[in-house]
Amino acid sequence: MADDTAKTAIHLEIREGLDGLTPARIVTLYRRAPLLRPVDRNERVWEMFEKASLVLTAWRDGDLVGIARVLTDGVLYSYLCDLAVEPDVQRHGVGKALLHEIFERCKGTELVLRDSDISSSYYAHLGFQRVGNAWVKYLR
């Protein structure tokens, strides 16, 4: 018999903005997800979120269970910087709910993201297409 718990949706509250967030909450979620980001300096983590165009959070019973951070010009391009979901609620629709909100709020733009080998199949099943025409230069 298949495991039906992986398909069970949970009740979520999706919020926009930084309300209820702290650097410690963000860092904990990133580490647990795991989202491979440099999170060793709280002030830098907080600055990433303050400067974002769109921050969406998912809450279940008052607990932060998911977060998404987007940079966008609102016209042509949007960049999904981060999407992190607590491991105990992964496969319950949290990431999908956050992405749905991003799709609505960034409608009309091309949504770009970078992923890791951990998450590449996740984005493919949601209709994202892999592209090979990108370049990266790390400015340190």
Image: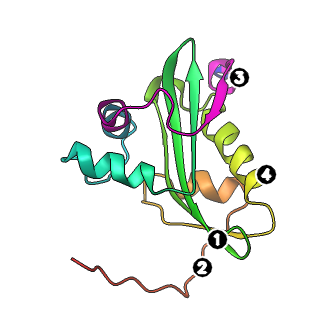
- Determine crowd level at label 1: few under 14, some 14-19, many 20+ residues with C-alpha closer than 10 A: few
Q: Which of marks 3 and 1 is in front?
A: 1
Q: What element carries label 4?
A: helix
Q: Which of marks 3 and 4 is in front?
A: 4
* Residue carrying label 2: 131
The numbered disc on residue 73 is: 1
Segment tinted magenta in the rendering: 4-27
The reply to whether callout 4 and callout 2 are in contact (CB within 8 Å) is no
**Given contact means CB atoms under 8 Å apart, are the residues at marks 3 and 4 in contact?**
no
Q: In this view, does 103 lie to the left or right of 69?
A: right
Q: In this view, does 62 lie above or below 128?
A: above
Q: Which of marks 1 and 2 is nearer the N terminus?
A: 1
Residue on which the image places disc 4: 104
Say which label, 4 or 2, has the lower sequence index: 4
Question: Measuring 81% from the left and 68% from the top, which residue is drawn there?
Answer: 108
- Of the 4 image quadrants, the one containing the N terminus is top right
Question: How busy is the neighbourhood of tag 3: few (under 14 within 10 Å), some, or many (20 plus)?
Answer: few
Query: What label sits on residue 9 in the rendered view?
Result: 3
